[in-house]
Amino acid sequence: MPLTGKPTPRAQRLREPNSLAASANRIWGMILRYWYVIRSSWPRTAELIYWPLVQMLMWGFLQSYLATASSFAAKAAGLFIGAVLLWDILVRSQLGFAVAFLEDIWSRNLGHLMMSPLRPVELVVALMAVSFIKLMVAMVPVALLAYTFFGFNVLSLGLAFAAFFANLVLTSWSLGLVSTGVVLRWGLGAESFAWLIVFVLLPVCCVYYPVATLPAWLQPVSLALPPTYVFEGLRAIVLEGRFVTVLMLKAVALNVVYFALGFAAFAYFLQSARRHGTLVQMGE
């Protein structure tokens, strides 16, 4: 097209910074950037798979041993492996979100992003998409190996698995928003918070045991967490052969609330970081 020619409609849309097309273009650009970082480094890809694989093998072999010594363990075949796979969905998705954000800080790129036309909501959407991509890279091979080694097919859970997966991913994004917001406000001194926040939930969201196992005073805390209903739902399917819809509805309702609070916290901490001038001071 000649330099003096009339711009095409698509070019005109992309020139409007607040247009939907321009927003989608910026999000796609961020996703490509993160994807190139993953693709260019095989150690990064190996690290995504390593820990889920080690946990799956450890719990899988333990369950195989217990199944030979306990009738209950034999009846609950797949319970430990299923719980491990679901827990790793939560962990890998949250870390995928947080680490992608931290890489921008480590590379001293965050200040440049915040001075670009990229809006906070577009950054969040890009981080969510990258978190999902990393989750697929990590969990698909591990799920295939779980079927190969132990005969556990996570897809055999059917629509229940889709409900479990969606709720855990939503929880992970809420945690990712809060953890990255804390790092935004207090800098890399709070980096460990992004790595550890999800593991605080491990004892109270009842991954490997029912809520009734917890002390009475701790049970309301557990029931206020969406993952608790996912793992209770998994036990209902494995032990009783039934999908409890009300558990998933409670998880969805809690996730909507927590995601809204997480985004509000992220936006608040971002504004606070801008006011205090810490965005351009972050780095290794």
Image: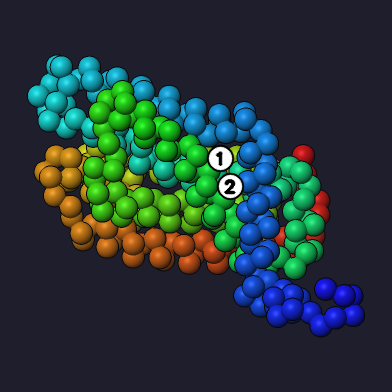
Q: Residue at x 27, y 25 (%)?
A: 150
- Please name the residue that numbered disc 2 is placed on: 98
> Which residue is nearer to you in this view: 142 or 4?
4
Res 222 seen here: no
Nearer the N terminus, badge 2 or badge 1? 2
Q: Residue 8: where, in percent of width, then height? A: 74, 78
**Neighbour class for label 1 at 10 Å: few (<14), some, many (≥20)?**
some
Asked if the residue under mark 1 is in contact with the one under mark 2, i.e. CB atoms within 8 Å, the reply is yes
Residue 123: name its quadrant: bottom right
Residue 12: name its quadrant: bottom right
- Please name the residue that numbered disc 1 is placed on: 195
Q: Quadrant of the C terminus?
A: top right
Residue 170: name its quadrant: bottom left
Amino acid under disc 1: Trp
Q: Residue 218: where, in percent of width, then height? A: 30, 47
Horizontal side of 50 relative to 120 (left or right) equals: left
Res 26 seen here: yes
Nearer to us: label 2 or label 1: 2
Q: Label 2 to label 1, Cα distance in Å? A: 8 Å
Label 2, secondary structure: give it: helix
